[in-house]
Image (cartoon, rainbow, N blue to C red):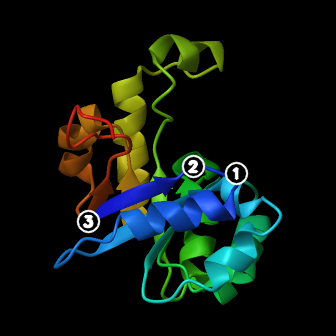
């Protein structure tokens, strides 16, 4: 699957991206993040999309009750995928899975913008690779439907996680239209 990022807060731009990305014999999904969902009409726009694969990238990270309540609150959008931070812990991940219904819960490993130095400054003692390994094991234990990780981490994640792996920001071509 390919998910096209709707990285805007504009309904007009979102509509244009969706229209331009229709490909015969190939189903494309659309990823909406915090910027779009929190825009004035973002939630309403998503609720009106029909026959589209909808990926909501909110990276939920909170206490178990708040996270599961957020998932329940999103169900009216009929989304297909929703991201949560694996670092929110096993209890929160399990609570989210319990209430998710048809929504595929996708765990986010360590953000791709962070490296081992950043992790150390946050108080983590383990290097990045070790953190991703532990997060992959936790996602498997929580029965998450997928993981979002760096393309560089796929091989490592696959050793500990058997379900869908999603990588952000990969360009199919170096040409940008």
* In the foreground, 75 or 11: 11
Q: Is residue 67 visible?
A: yes
Instruction: Find out whether the residues at labels 1 and 2 contact each other: C-beta distance under 8 Å.
Output: yes
* In the foreground, 149 or 127: 149
| Image position of 167 (left or right of 54) | left
CA gap, disc 1 and disc 3: 23 Å
Q: Position of residue 43 (x, y in %)?
A: 72, 73
Residue 50, placed above or below residue 148: below
Quadrant the C terminus occupies: top left
CA gap, disc 3 and disc 2: 18 Å
Between disc 3 and disc 2, whose residue precedes?
3
Q: Residue furthest right?
A: 40
Between disc 1 and disc 3, whose residue precedes?
3
Q: Residue at x 74, y 78 (%)?
A: 44
Q: Position of residue 149 (x, y in %)?
A: 37, 43
Give the label on residue 7, or none: 2
Q: Is residue 90 visible?
A: no
* In the foreground, 48 or 113: 48
Residue 164, placed above or below residue 152: below
Give the label on residue 35, or none: 1
Circle 3 residue: 1
Q: Secondary structure at mark 2?
A: loop
Quadrant the N terminus occupies: bottom left
Q: Residue at x 43, y 32 (%)?
A: 131
Between disc 1 and disc 2, whose residue precedes?
2
Q: Residue at x 45, y 67 (%)?
A: 18
Q: Secondary structure at mark 3?
A: loop
Mark 2 residue crowding within 10 angstroms, few (<14) / some (14–19) / many (20+): some
Mark 1 residue crowding within 10 angstroms, few (<14) / some (14–19) / many (20+): some
Q: Secondary structure at mark 1?
A: helix
Residue 8, placed above or below residue 29: above
Q: Position of residue 150 (x, y in %)?
A: 34, 37
């Amino acid at each position: 699957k390919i998910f096209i990022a709707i990285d805007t807060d504009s309904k007009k731009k979102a509509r244009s991206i969706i229209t331009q990305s229709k490909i015969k014999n190939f189903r494309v999904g659309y990823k909406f993040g915090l910027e779009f969902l929190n825009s004035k009409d973002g939630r309403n726009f998503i609720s009106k999309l029909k026959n589209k694969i909808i990926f909501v990238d909110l990276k939920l990270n909170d206490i178990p009750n708040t996270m599961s309540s957020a998932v329940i609150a999103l169900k009216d959008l009929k989304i297909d995928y929703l991201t949560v931070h694996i670092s929110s812990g096993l209890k929160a991940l399990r609570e989210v899975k319990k209430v998710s219904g048809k929504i595929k819960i996708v765990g986010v490993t360590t953000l791709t913008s962070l490296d081992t130095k950043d992790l150390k400054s946050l108080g983590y003692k383990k290097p990045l690779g070790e953190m991703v390994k532990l997060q992959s094991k936790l996602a498997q234990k929580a029965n998450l439907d997928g993981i979002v990780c760096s393309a560089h981490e796929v091989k490592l994640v696959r050793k500990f996680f058997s379900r869908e792996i999603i990588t952000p920001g990969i360009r199919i071509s170096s040409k940008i239209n």
